[in-house]
Amino acid sequence: MKKAGFFCVILVVFAGLAGAQENRSGVQAILNHSAARNFTAGAVSQGDLDQILLAGIRSPSANNRQPWMFTVVRSPALARQIVSNNEDGNLLIVISAEGDGRTNGSQILDCALAAQSMYLAAQALGYGSRIYTGPINSINQRLKDQLALPSGHNAVVLVRVGRVQGNVDAQSAASSRAAVDTKVQYK
């Protein structure tokens, strides 16, 4: 009986260590991300897309309103109207919300959190991803009907997901970042 209790304690300790390791790997995934620039042609599987979209759905939002709608753009012609260098098989996820996209700060933040979750999920699954805001005005002025955005919705942000060249790692591809001590203060 004492041996069984001892082994149970050992299992709990190892399970706790494994959980801590998983948490560390989650932090590493965040610390090692980079906004891909080296996209290549190649499809994103439906199973992986489902996981990426689920990451967006599971994102936090103010008062759990979940104001977003995700529009997946698979059409190469339509995708190139939004991001001119989009490669075949890459997809764009346009995140929209009700309103003009500028006045409701919590909706903008909610959509940004969903974008970040999908961006990181795509990279965790081995894809390149990038978050865009530059094309948003063009989408809202010219492409809302083609995208069939819900009535009253405007695009807020979009996420590109696709294959990337295998010879570029996140560290060498990443833009430089400011040192922590230049961006954090303690009081």
Image (tube, rainbow, N blue to C red):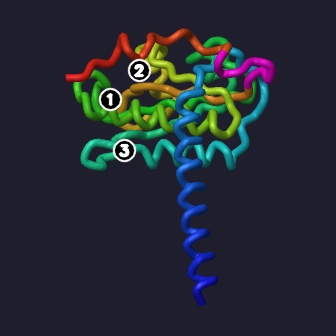
Give the residue displayed 41% in from the left and 17% down from the top.
180
**Left or right of 73 in this view: 158:** left
Q: Which residue is mark 3?
A: 60
Give the residue displayed 62% in from the left and 83% down from the top.
4
Mark 3: secondary structure? loop
Q: Disc 2 and disc 3: Cα gap in Å?
A: 25 Å
Q: Magenta segment, principal secondary structure?
A: loop
Q: Which residue is mark 1?
A: 108
Q: Residues within 10 Å of mark 1 (few under 14, many from 20)?
A: many
Q: Which residues are magenta?
A: 164-171
Q: Is residue 125 above or below residue 18?
A: above
Question: Front-most of 3 and 115?
Answer: 3
Within the image, what quadrant is residue 110 found in? Answer: top left
Q: Mark 1 and mark 3 in contact (Cβ < 8 Å)?
A: no
Q: Position of residue 99 (x, y in %)?
A: 28, 30
Q: Residue furthest bottom?
A: 1
**Left or right of 133 in this view: 169:** right
Upstream in sequence: badge 3 or badge 1: 3
Give the residue displayed 61% in from the left and 69% down from the top.
11
Question: Front-most of 49 and 154?
Answer: 49
Question: Front-most of 58 and 124?
Answer: 124
Q: Position of residue 153 (x, y in %)?
A: 36, 33
Q: Which residue is mark 2?
A: 140
- Dot 3 amino acid type: Pro
Q: Disc 3 and disc 1: Cα gap in Å?
A: 12 Å
